[in-house]
Amino acid sequence: MSSNRETTESERTKGGIDPASMKSGFAELMIQSGAVKFGSFTLKSGRISPYFINLGVLGDGAAIGRLGEFYADALVAYGLAQRTDILFGPSYKGIPIAVSTAIALSRNHGIPMRFAFNRKEAKAHGEGGLIIGSHLKDGDRVGLLDDVMTTGKTKEETLDIIRSAAKVEVGYVLIAVDRMERGETDLRATEEFRVRYGIPVHSIASIQEVAGSEAARSAVTPERMQAIGEYLRAYGGKDRA
């Protein structure tokens, strides 16, 4: 099952983008760049995970440009772009995501899109404030872009920043890879966030889709796939409340 449970079948054909091809190309970028690694990794939670996701390794223009193209393709394919007035990228990792996605939407899809992001601390001089980029305006439909979602708690601060700037509607969160792990309950963290805040979370691909796509190209071994399955059986979350 796709991690984008909220996306209808009709939305999947929008923009002439084939979701399967998009996910396959995205998986290739993640593996080849080292943004997704398979092995044995100790997480902050203390869990030993067979996979690790870090978009921070995408440190050159070509790589971040490709990432923005995949985010833009997902926004179009899932029917989200036409329901968005401004993209917001929470600092720090969300900043290059929002910028590169806005560029890709304009360049590849002819969709002009505003973007903004926040400082970690308010600036008391110059233009001041927390938000950089396009000003948030009352009535704006905001799309929140980030890399992954572990518990969703870090997104709460971002929601407060956005909503304190103007009377806006945060319509969705789009992340790169759904880790498929449970949050604070038995629900998947992305579903837990939807239930708690009423905001759906979409992903370009789930970790199973990334690994499965690369397994088909023999880039991920059967042993790694087995380890991922065992890990998700132990720590995976339900994708429906």
Image (cartoon, rainbow, N blue to C red):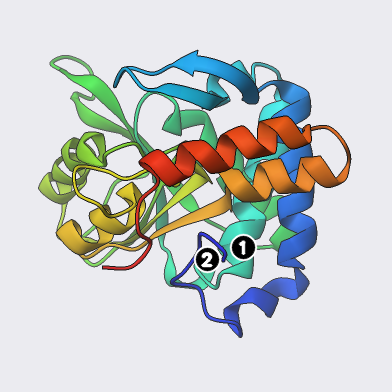
- The residue carrying pointer 1 sits among few (fewer than 14), some (14 to 19) or many (20 or more) residues within 10 Å by Cα, namely some
The relative height of residue 142 versus residue 60 in the rendered view (above or below) is below
Kind of residue indicated by mark 2: Ala
State the CA–CA distance, disc 1 to disc 2. 8 Å
Tell me the quadrant of the picture where the C terminus can be found.
bottom left
Circle 1 residue = 111
**Residue at horizontal 13 percent and vertical 43 percent from the top:** 160
The answer to whether residue 179 is visible is: no
Q: Residue at x 30, y 46 (%)?
A: 135
Please, what secondary structure does the residue beneath circle 1 have? loop
Quarter of the image where one finds residue 51: top right
Decide: marks 1, 2 in contact (CB < 8 A)? yes
Quarter of the figure with the N terminus: bottom right
Mark sitting on residue 208: none
Give the residue displayed 75% in from the left and 62% down from the top: 20
Q: Which residue is mark 2?
A: 81
Residue 161 horizontal/vertical position (percent): 17, 39
Instruction: Give the vertical position of 82 relative to 93 (above or below).
Output: below
Q: Secondary structure at mark 2?
A: helix
- What percent of the width, then of the height, locates residue 176? 54, 43
Upstream in the sequence, badge 1 or badge 2? 2
Displayed quadrant of residue 146: top left
Nearer the camera: disc 1 or disc 2: 2
